[in-house]
Image (tube, rainbow, N blue to C red):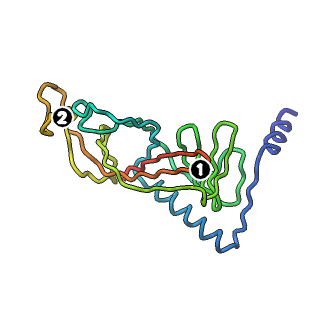
Amino acid sequence: GALWIYQWDRERRTARLIYDVDSPELLQRFSLCNAAGEALSRAARRWHIYYSVRTQDQKRNAGATSLIRRTRVPCVPRPLPLIDCNVQPWSIPAGPQRLLFLPDRLLVHEGRRIAAIPYTQLAVEALTSRFIEEESVPSDATVVGSTWRFVNKSGGPDRRFNNNRQLPILSYGEVSLRSSSGIEADTAPGH
């Protein structure tokens, strides 16, 4: 009896999204979503940037002007829990939220809430940024320079620190999503 109640409750709470797979317009948008998801999934590493602050202490921060906190994230083709769909959408976590890229809108799942944002209301910005990497260098990253962990005024190593190693400066891609309804998500693929 408990199994039947569990299945009934799960069925009651599951949302079903059925798309017309014969629509050329829908197929075109879905192929764009797939191309973006596949490109993100091919990156050697992906991070969600959840904290960024400017710093004046460039000497102790390898010459960086901003300090960030980031966490690695996967990009996988799978729907959100309790959502059945007749297409295979790409999903990526962004902090406490999980983003689901559907052919007609972006679903944002956080806790017990889901918000749907039409792509016409979504501002997407893709750019490259220079990043001083303290972890291992991703296999697909482009090294554009190097710096020292502790930098003196001339840009050379500060000899007052014994464990002053050289750090690579990498060129990373960065994707930012923003909407007028309040979503803001930054993801940096590692290439």
Q: In front: 153, or 35?
A: 153
Residue type at mark 1? Ser
Residue type at mark 2? Val
Image location (x, y in percent) of residue 183: 57, 46
Residue 112 badge: none
Question: Which residue was labeled with disc 1?
Answer: 180
Q: Residue at x 21, y 49 (%)?
A: 145
Is 186 on the left or on the right of 169, as rendered?
right
Question: Which residue was labeled with disc 2?
Answer: 151
Image location (x, y in percent) of residue 109: 64, 43
Element under disc 1: loop
Asked whether residue 88 appears in the rendered view, the answer is: no
Q: Residue at x 53, y 38 (%)?
A: 95
Q: Residue at x 47, y 50 (%)?
A: 176
Which part of the image, by quadrant, shows the N terminus? top right
Q: Residue at x 74, y 60 (%)?
A: 18
Image location (x, y in percent) of residue 136: 31, 41
Is 80 on the left or on the right of 31, as rendered?
right
Mark 2 or mark 1: name the one nearer the start of the chain: 2
Q: In front: 81, or 131?
A: 131
- Looking at the image, residue 113 lies above or below residue 44: above
Element under disc 2: loop
Q: Please tell me how crowded label 2 is: few (under 14), some (14-19), or many (20+) other residues with Cα within 10 Å.
A: many
Which quarter of the picture shows residue 61?
Answer: top left
Which quarter of the picture shows residue 151?
Answer: top left
Q: Nearer the viewer, mark 2 or mark 1?
A: 1
Is 15 on the left or on the right of 32, as rendered?
right
